[in-house]
């Protein structure tokens, strides 16, 4: 299903810094998921630059693993799915509806994974930016609070089999996204990817987006959207500051671990200066 046989698993594990056991059990699932989200940043710079986003496993491997870039949900979770499938996990896809923008009804454009371990389904998602979970979240126990360091998640069940991922922020539970029981396949992600990378209403078209849901050695999370760099603390505090064009590459490299080619770096700065 996820072309795991095409993935250079050793290169992927080296990229995420994982050297533990490779058993299709919950300990391995947690460890690989956490290592992936810590090592590979969320970013959609290629969308901004007008580059095509391929979801072929070898193309994703060249970019995120060998090129040491980041990617957005379709790239991140396709790569994670291929790795987990290669290790021996049962992996299924789902399409989710973002709920972080108030009452607006948004289309199903977010790609997530459901991994079954010993008969129990777990939500896995390496591609929801700074608000996303660092580790798998159980789906078979709605309402169970799942602490992940200083951040806490839970899944709420609605009608018609819809499940909602929520997280605790400033003493209140906030919806992140909702998804139904219908499976999604790699070909569905291709269609969703086309919308997200090209439609004028997509949040990724025409603006710079980069996130890290986990900064090694720290509890905070970071975000760069357009020209604003934000540090998000578990207690609800946020620190924001504008980013000038001459410091853009330093922040992308130092804070997010994103290193662009000389050509892409030059084009990004040109676009950044023109916009901001």
Image (tube, grey):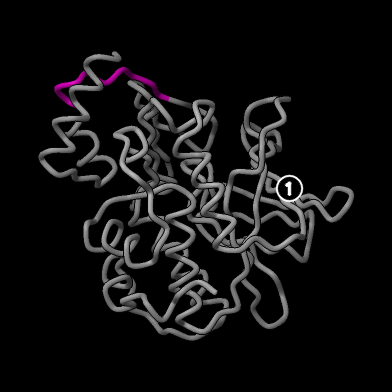
Q: Decide if residue 238 is on the left or right side of residue 174.
A: left
Q: Residue at x 48, y 53 (%)?
A: 74
Q: Quadrant of the C terminus?
A: top left
Q: Position of residue 77 (x, y in %)?
A: 49, 59
Question: What segment carries the magenta color?
Answer: 239-247
Q: Decide if residue 46 is on the left or right side of residue 102.
A: left
Q: Is residue 115 shown in magenta?
A: no
Asked if residue 151 is positioned above or below residue 8 in the image, the reply reads above
Q: Position of residue 157 (x, y in %)?
A: 82, 52
Q: Position of residue 269 (x, y in %)?
A: 19, 25
Q: Residue at x 60, y 63 (%)?
A: 185
Instruction: Classify residue 50 by image quadrant.
Output: top left
Asked if residue 111 is positioned above or below residue 130 in the image, the reply reads below
In the image, 60 versus 85, the foreground residue is 60
Q: Decide if residue 183 is on the left or right side of residue 7.
A: right
Q: Position of residue 87 (x, y in %)?
A: 46, 82
Q: Quadrant of the N terminus?
A: bottom right
User: Dot 1 corresponds to which residue?
Assistant: 164
Q: Residue at x 29, y 43 (%)?
A: 256
Q: Decide if residue 167 is on the left or right side of residue 208.
A: right
In the image, 203 versus 128, the foreground residue is 203
Instruction: Point out the residue furthest to the right here.
Output: 159
In the image, 246 versus 167, the foreground residue is 246
């Amino acid at each position: 299903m996820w072309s795991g046989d095409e993935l250079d698993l050793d290169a992927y594990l080296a990229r995420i810094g994982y050297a533990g056991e490779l058993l299709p059990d919950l300990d391995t699932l947690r460890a690989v998921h956490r290592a992936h989200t810590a090592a590979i940043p969320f970013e959609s710079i290629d969308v901004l630059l007008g580059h095509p986003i391929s979801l072929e496993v070898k193309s994703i491997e060249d970019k995120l693993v060998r090129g040491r870039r980041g990617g957005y949900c379709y790239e991140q979770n396709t790569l994670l799915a291929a790795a987990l499938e290669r290790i021996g996990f049962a992996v299924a896809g789902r399409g989710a509806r973002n709920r972080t923008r108030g009452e607006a009804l948004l289309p199903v454009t977010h790609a997530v994974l459901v991994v079954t371990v010993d008969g129990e389904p777990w939500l896995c998602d390496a591609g929801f930016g700074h608000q996303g979970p660092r580790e798998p979240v159980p789906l078979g126990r709605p309402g169970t609070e799942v602490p992940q360091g200083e951040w806490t998640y839970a899944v709420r069940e609605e009608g018609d089999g819809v499940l909602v991922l929520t997280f605790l922020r400033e003493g209140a539970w906030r919806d992140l996204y909702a998804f139904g029981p219908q499976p999604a396949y790699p070909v569905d992600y291709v269609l969703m990817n086309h919308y997200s990378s090209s439609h004028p209403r997509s949040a990724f078209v025409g603006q710079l987006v980069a996130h890290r849901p986990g900064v090694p050695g720290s509890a905070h999370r970071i975000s760069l959207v357009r020209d604003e760099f934000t540090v998000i603390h578990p207690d609800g505090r946020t620190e924001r500051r504008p980013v000038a064009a001459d410091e853009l590459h330093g922040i992308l490299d130092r804070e997010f671990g994103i290193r662009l080619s000389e050509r892409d770096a030059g084009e990004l700065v040109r676009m950044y200066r023109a916009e901001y």
